[in-house]
Amino acid sequence: QVQVVESGGGLVQAGGSLRLSCAVSGSPFSFRTMGWYRQAPGKQRGLVATITSGGSTDYADSVKGRFTISGDSAKNTVYLQMNSLKAEDTAVYYCYTKLTVVREYWGQGTQVTVSS
């Protein structure tokens, strides 16, 4: 059974940093794409950053220059380094992985709260 487990969320002051981690277990496949989405109260879930097995990355405009995604497809892990955090970054952050064309999975989410 595939499991997606996030860690690293928490409470931080504006301007601070956090590092999120996500690990996929139980899969015979390495990820094709893995990344992070977030959902703030009253808003839809949206892209934060993704990385492919080839190392290509994509970022939401709102986090470019502040967040960095990295990953290891062989280990099915991904990380999100978040710097210069703002109050508007407060959300539940969800890890996403696409293992095959039809196999996609989500984690349970980890809360990130940035106090201003």
Image (spheres, rainbow, N blue to C red):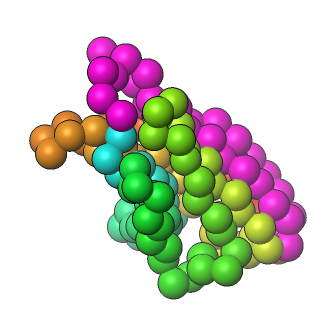
| Above or below, comparing residue 109 to residue 90 in the picture | above
Quadrant where the C terminus is found in the figure: bottom right
Q: Which residue is drawn at 20% across and 40% down?
A: 100
Give left or right: position of 78 versus 10: left
For the image shown, how many numbered marks are present on the structure? 0
State whether residue 40 appears in this view.
yes
Residue found farthest to the bottom: 61
Q: Nearest the camera: 33 or 38? A: 33
Q: Nearest the camera: 104 or 88? A: 104
Where in the figure is residue 47, as x and y percent of width and height? 42, 67
Q: Which residue is drawn at 30% across and 15% down?
A: 1
Residue found farthest to the left: 102
Q: Which residue is drawn at 77% across and 67% down?
A: 83
State whether residue 39 appears in this view.
no
Q: Does the magenta stretch include residue 100?
A: no
Q: Residue at x 70, y 58 (%)?
A: 81
Give left or right: position of 66 versus 17: left
Give left or right: position of 7 versus 51: right
Where in the figure is residue 56, as x and y percent of width and height? 44, 65
Q: Nearest the camera: 115 or 63? A: 63
Q: Is residue 7 magenta?
A: yes
Where in the figure is residue 27, as x and y percent of width and height? 33, 22
Residue numbers of the magenta segment: 1-30
Give left or right: position of 81 versus 12: left
Where in the figure is residue 40, as x and y percent of width and height? 51, 64
Which image quarter: residue 22?
A: top right
| Above or below, comparing residue 88 to residue 69 in the picture | below
